[in-house]
Image (spheres, helix red, strand yellow):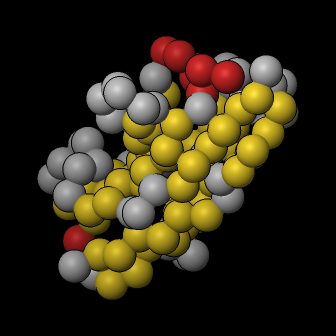
Amino acid sequence: QVQLVESGGGLVQAGGSLRLSCVASGKIFTINAMGWYRQAPGKQRDLVARILSGGSTYLADSVKGRFTISRDNAKNTVYLQMNMLKPEDTAVYYCAAGLRGKLVPTDYWGQGTQVTVSS
């Protein structure tokens, strides 16, 4: 099993920045992909960013140029740097991890952290 604990959410004005962190513990050696999803009220949970253990990244079109995902394997931590935030970025953000052999992180989930962007 792998446990994921997120931190860093909060309230910010439009144009501001936040950095989310997710620390993984447990059987870290079993996972490859780590990433962030978000879910706004009444909407589905969507993948925002993903990073593989080798460093390859994916960013959703809606956040390209504004968000950056990074990973510190020594600290078992993945980060989501969010700049130029917009009200439409408001959502609960979930950290996720995927087992080796998978490119999309869907096997383990954090509890979620709220990000609210005011206009």
Q: Position of residue 2 (x, y in %)?
A: 29, 75
Q: Residue 11 is drawn in which quadrant?
A: top right
Q: Which residue lies furthest to the bottom in this view?
A: 26
* Left or right placement of residue 113 versus residue 100 in this view: right
Q: Residue 40 is drawn in which quadrant?
A: top left
Q: Position of residue 69 (x, y in %)?
A: 57, 43
The quadrant of the image that shows the C terminus is top right
Q: Which residue lies furthest to the front in this view?
A: 42
Residue at point 43% right, 51% down? 94
* Left or right placement of residue 108 versus residue 110 in this view: left
Q: In this view, does 36 lie above or below 62?
A: below
Q: Where is residue 109 in the image (x, y as percent from the top left)?
A: 32, 60
Q: Which residue lies furthest to the top in this view?
A: 61
- Decide if residue 82 is in sight here: yes
How many marks the image carries: the answer is 0
Residue at point 23% right, 71% down? 30
Residue at point 35% right, 27% down? 42
- Decide if residue 79 is in sight here: no
Q: Position of residue 29 (x, y in %)?
A: 29, 75
Q: Nearer the viewer, residue 118 or 64?
A: 118
* Left or right placement of residue 14 versus residue 93 in this view: right
Residue at point 71% right, 32% down? 117
Q: In this view, does 92 lie above or below 43?
A: below
* Left or right placement of residue 96 versus residue 89 in this view: left
The quadrant of the image that shows the N terminus is bottom left
